[in-house]
Amino acid sequence: MMLSIRQSPDSDPNAGFAKDESNPFQSNTEWIQRWREVDSTFCSPGDVVLLGGQSLADFRVRVAQSPTRHDLTPSYWSLVGVVDAGGRILTAPLWPLQTPDRVPVTNGIRSLELAEFADENLWPNMGIIRFPGARQDPVECVKRLTRQRSIVDIPTLLVTWLGFAWGGAAAGNPLVGGVGLPSAVLVETAFGLAEVELTPGLATASSCPEAIYQAAKWWTDYYVKTAGPRRRTRGAAAVHPEGRYIIRKPEATYVDPLPDPLLEPKSDE
C-alpha cells in the first residue's frame, strides 16, 4: 500500500503559522512563555502541540513519515497532543510507557506535564497550532475518547507502532500499511468529533504529525472556506490555523539510549 498525499492548491505557506528563528537555546517551556508575553492566548486549551524528539524511537517515527513528504526526507515531528485547561498535554505516546493494566482503562491516552518536554536537547522541535472552526471543545472530545475505544482503538495502534519502534519481526512501516501514529490518530479523531478536519491533504487513514503540520502550513484556503468568511472583523476568531514553531534539529538524529548499569559488563580495573 502506498500513502496517498494530495497536493495543496495554495501556492504560498500560511503566514499565520510562522517559523521562529530566534533564540533556539531556550528550553521549550521558556520558548512558550516568551510567546505568551507576545500573545497571552498562546498555548491555550484546545491548541495542538507538535513535538520532534531525539530518542531512537522518535528517530524511527520521524523516518517512518518520509513517504508523506514530497522530498522523502524525515519529518520534523514524532508526537502530537492537545493542551488541556491545566496546561498539560493530552496525547497517546509510545513512551513513557504506561503499566499494561492502565492502557485499556484509558484507551492509551495520557495527560503529561509540559515540563516533561522542556529539554530542548531531547525535544528540539516544537510547534503550537490553533485550528479554527471547532464546534465542540477538543479537550472534552479527547476525554470522551478515553471511554470510547469503539470510536478509535488506540491500544491496537500502540502495539503495532511499538513493534516497529523495537524492530519486531516483520514489523514494517505502519504508515505504509495504513496504520496511523497513535498520538496523531487521537488528535485527528478528537478534532473530527469537533467538526474540524486536521489532515485535508491525507487521503488515507495514515494519520501522522507530519500531515497535521502540512495542513497548518499549506492548506490555508481550505480552512478559510470551511471555518468562516474571508473577511475578519475586529475581534473575530481566526479562520485559518495560527501559531508558531521552532526547528532546532531539521535532520532526524538520535541520542544513544542510556545504558542499564546492571547489564553493563564489569570492568577489569
Image (cartoon, grey):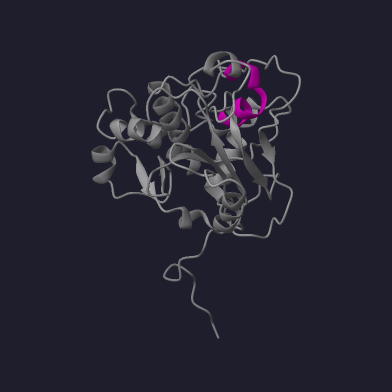
Q: Nearer the viewer, residue 153 or 89?
A: 89
Figure quadrant of residue 262:
bottom left
Can residue 249 be seen from the camera position used here?
yes
Vertical order, 247 against 266 (above or below) = above
Can residue 3 be seen from the camera position used here?
no
Q: Nearer the viewer, residue 89 or 228?
A: 228
- Count of picture labels: 0
**Dominant SS in magenta:** helix
Which quadrant is home to the C terminus?
bottom right
Residue 177: % across, % down: 50, 22
Identify the residue shown where x is 26% and y is 45%: 102
Q: Is residue 122 magenta?
A: no
Q: Is residue 214 magenta?
A: yes
Q: Nearer the viewer, residue 186 or 230?
A: 230
Identify the residue shown where x is 70% and y is 14%: 9
Extreme residue in the bottom direction: 269
- Does 113 sit left or right of 176 as displayed? left
Identify the residue shown where x is 41% and y is 51%: 96
Figure quadrant of residue 11:
top right
Residue 108: % across, % down: 33, 39
Which quadrant is home to the N terminus?
top right
Q: Which residues are magenta?
A: 212-223
Identify the residue shown where x is 52% and y is 24%: 198
Vertical order, 120 against 198 (above or below) = below
Residue 238: % across, % down: 57, 27
Vertical order, 218 against 86 (above or below) = above
Residue 112: % across, % down: 40, 50
